[in-house]
Image (cartoon, rainbow, N blue to C red):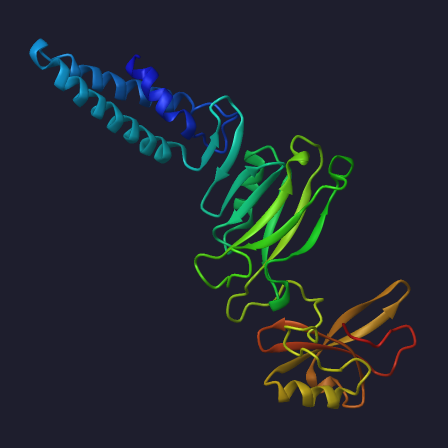
Amino acid sequence: MKDIDEINELLRPLARIGPDEPGGRAGGTRAQALFADIVAQERDTTTVVGPLRRLRDRHQARRTLLGLAASAVLALGVVLGPSLLGYGGGTAISYANSAVEIREEGDTYVARIKDPYADHRKFSEAFRALGLNVELKVIPVSPTAVGRIVRMGGNITSAIENVPFGARKEPADCDLADSGCFLTVTVPAAIKGTSGVMSFDLGRLAKPGESYANEWQSATRAGEQLAGAKVSGRAVNDVRAEVRKRGLTAEFSLVSVHDGGYELKPLAADQVRGDWIVYKVTSVRAGVVRLEVTAERHPALEYMQD
């Protein structure tokens, strides 16, 4: 086998391209030039072998060839950046960058989040590299939403009916504060090549002092900061006492009801009377909750909590 053929054979399972290069071929013109230069140097070295040393040096040349192949892999990684791995026939089955690794597993693609605090464009870049129109954001959320898909949208429909989307921790039930615990997202391979876009917001642990992006989450659900508290329909002073008992502080919003729903307007604490009615309490960030209040009991609101 010729040297260049042997190197190509060794490198076939590790084909790499940059995210801006098409297809699944083993590199671009820069990579081919690098291969040619390495092989030329290897040939220059082995042409001086004498006939009496041929058998011994053949094994040496083989080791040299393997070393050069490894060097080529490392050099290509430097030149071309993130990796796109395939079977060698032009079909990419996985992609990895500094934020995420995505791998085809059966009829799904599994994305393992390596850096949940990375720029969200890194996640979407990885999906696009595999032909998947998926936009993923990993956002800070309150405790019970960590590791869950908290928002999902898009306009891919008919091709993905009855196919699973999901999120989980890996290993199951691990502590995301540990380095060996990963968030994963599962996307059906059926969406590959379809038009439209699917978007996901995946919950991650919030940094100290960071506000939660799922600002609608009830603070009284199990696992949240006011878990088990009965607050909806009660007077502000009563709920404030419960908040203080839990070692929390409160912010306030005024509930303004209109046809089809309601909106919230920020209120300073000194604008809120103690006999006003609490409609809902949500989590803002660690140690802080928000009381959504009305000046009186509003007939259009259902005063109950999760």
| Vertical position of residue 286 compared to residue 231: above or below | above
Picture quadrant where residue 239 is located? bottom right
Q: Residue at x 70, y 32 (%)?
A: 194
Residue 109 appears in the picture as rendered? yes
Instruction: Name the residue at 42% across, 28% down.
Output: 13
- Quarter in which the C terminus is drawn: bottom right
Furthest residue toward front: 55
Q: Is residue 165 left or right of residue 99?
A: right
What percent of the width, then of the height, locates residue 264?
A: 77, 70
Q: On the image, which quarter does residue 37 sit in? A: top left
Give the answer, above or below, for where 104 lies relative to 3: below
Residue depicted at 89% across the width and 62% down the height: 260
Q: Residue at x 61, y 55 (%)?
A: 202
Q: Is residue 77 left or right of residue 263?
A: left
Q: Position of residue 213 (x, y in %)?
A: 63, 62
Any part of residue 15 in sight:
no
Quarter of the image that includes the N terminus: top left
Taking the image as shown, residue 75 lies to the left or right of residue 107, namely: left
Q: Nearer the viewer, residue 68 or 174?
A: 174
Which x, y percent locates residue 171? 51, 55
